[in-house]
Amino acid sequence: MKTLTIKTFALFMLASAAFFPDFNSRSTIQPDGFSLSVPSHKKSSTNERQHPVSAANTPLYCKAKPEPQDSLPMENKTKTGLGASKDGAFILGADISQLYRIEAHGGTFRCNGKTANPVAILKEHGINFVRVRLWHDPREGCCNLKETLRLAKLADSLGLGLLLDIHYSDTWADPGHQTKPAAWSNVTFDSLIDSMYAYTKSVIGALDKQHTPPAIVQIGNEIECGILWDDGRVCGSFNDKKHWDALTDLLKAGIKGARESSNHPNKIKIMIHVSCSTNTRASEEFFDRLISKGVDFDLIGLSYYPWWHGSMQALKTNMELLASRYEKGIVIAETAYPWTLSWKDDTHNIVGLGRQLLTGYPATVAGQERFITDLIKTVKGITADGSKGIFYWGGIDISAPRMGSSCENIALFDFSGDVLKSVEAFQN
């Protein structure tokens, strides 16, 4: 498609729209009493394409440092890790799940033109935590346990805390997709409970064994419609007592496995993550049910993408309600904002239209920086028991020579792999 002219490409897209679904369309799930708009933000979408641009990027100070080692002696590093999740500490995190896949496809990262490890670059500019997703048995190897252990060692070598995001699926899990791992697809519900417990305990045990324990464990990803469908599904026709009981039993099994496996059971934090970050009614109904059924967790994780979830004020209103109602820590588990509406590769980006932007936050490097800065201020302003913080999603997901990226224009690195000035927002 790179050989097509812009005009020809535009005509092709208009014609094909009648025959092919928009992969960025958000299915609407109708639980009893409210609607949930479901972002399929792990898919690529049709964009309003503009000409490729380079980022206007003021040079940043970067220390000359070697590649981080897999592990360093504990006495030689400042360990953020568990300490960063203590009550009152503010978490500044980034999802680094795609790192080795990007590098394997030729992606490189730079600061002021010098090649460097992107996680080290982010740490130098204020990041103190990383988030890593774990899939059960993925086809292509990405996000498997072996890769997770390697990323945990990298984070540990840099003194960064680790949030382990367990999807309980072989692929993406979100409000529109919560497919059981193939290995669990035909087991009884009692066996599913056992598998949830044993698997969670096993993977955290593997991290403990190599001395890289997670500070935070996410039991599922964006789970307001449940996990391990259809047993733990709770939206639409599944919104009944039977399925809510099943969901809470599954969550309790995972939480038990996480707490029992850890060498630091009193320090490990359990996060429950949902995407309905600006929907107060949906948030209340979900967490009320979990609390009433005795689900034991420490942190409420929220996804916030303005083009799907709306204004920062709506987010603030819901965070304040959740913090006061449940007395839990509040963390933005996923967020991002574009620094351009342009593109480098032929993969459709998850955001690419001017109408998807927040007022006052243009799709520029400065606009991206302002968004991150204001979001941090907003979360810090919430009165919440426990930890608070944000995790930036897609920050390292640049377009590589042999692999496109639907997040290339929301990354914290430009189309050449150079870190953007907007990363300074994490230091302000």
Image: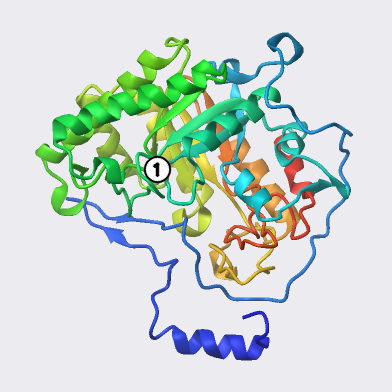
Q: Residue 336: give x, y in percent of width and height.
A: 58, 50
Location of residue 8 by image quarter: bottom right
Give the left or right position of residue 421, taking residue 61 as reference.
left
Nearest to the observer: residue 258 or residue 401? 401
> For the image shown, how many numbered marks are present on the structure?
1
Q: Residue 82: give x, y in percent of width and height.
A: 56, 17
The local secondary structure at tag 1 comes to loop
Q: Residue at x 40, y 49 (%)?
A: 171
In the rendered image, the quadrant that contains the C terminus is top right
Within-10-Å neighbours for mark 1: few <14, some 14–19, many 20+? some
Q: Residue 310: give x, y in percent of width and height.
A: 47, 55
Nearest to the observer: residue 422 or residue 18? 18
Q: Is 78 located above or below residue 36 in the figure? A: above
Nearest to the observer: residue 359 or residue 131? 131
Give the left or right position of residue 225, taking residue 33 as reference.
right
**Which residue carries the number 1 mark?**
137
Q: Residue at x 88, y 39 (%)?
A: 61
Q: Residue 333: give x, y in percent of width and height.
A: 50, 38
For the residue marked with disc 1, what is the amino acid?
Asp
Give the left or right position of residue 90, taking residue 315 as reference.
right
